Amino acid sequence: FSGSTESFDATIIESGVKSEKVERVTGKVTIADADTVVSAGRGLKGPENWGMIEELADVLGAATACSKPVSDLGWRPHGEHV
């Protein structure tokens, strides 16, 4: 899994207020970092059907990818085009 970590440190001068460091991991596996890629094309018939591809990729710990026509149609970002 590849992602980014965002750190937030709160400093509050007021007494009686507790602060703590919070880290959040965001992002998905990128095509460049993935051992497995789940790719699909226009056979899905529309962007509304892409959820099953994302779910499968999540289960497999894989990246998602798409065909050039799918990215050209705006169904998926051009960064996913393979």
Image (tube, rainbow, N blue to C red):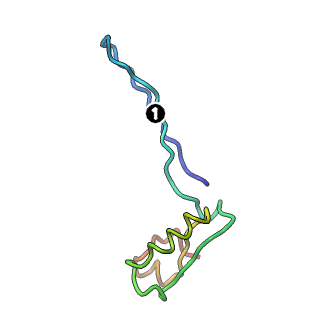
Q: Position of residue 13 (x, y in %)?
A: 33, 14
- Looking at the picture, tell me which residue is in the foreground, 18 or 27: 18
Q: Residue at x 55, y 70 (%)?
A: 56
Q: Which residue is situated farthest in the front direction here?
A: 59
Of residues 30 and 53, the one drawn nearer to the viewer in this rendering: 53
How many discs mark residues in the rendered view? Answer: 1
Q: Is residue 52 above or below residue 58?
A: below
Which quarter of the rendered picture does the C terminus lie within? bottom right
In percent of the image, x 56 and y 68: which residue is there? 57
Above/below status of 49 relative to 5: below
Residue in the picture at 59% in, 73% down: 38
**Disc 1 residue type?**
Val
Residue name at image x 39 percent, y 83 percent: 46
Q: Is residue 2 left or right of residue 9?
A: right
Task: Give the SS element for disc 1.
Answer: strand
Seen from this angle, which residue lies furthest right?
35
Residue ID for mark 1: 22
Q: In x, y percent, where is residue 58?
A: 55, 63
Coordinates of residue 60 in the picture (x, y in percent): 61, 65
Residue 36: image quadrant is bottom right
Q: Is residue 7 above or below residue 36?
A: above
In the rendered image, which quarter contains the N terminus? bottom right
Query: How many residues crowd around disc 1 within 10 Å: few (fewer than 14), some, or many (20 or more)?
Result: few
Give residue 80's position: percent from left, percent from top.
53, 70
| Residue 31 location, quadrant | bottom right
Furthest-top residue in this view: 15
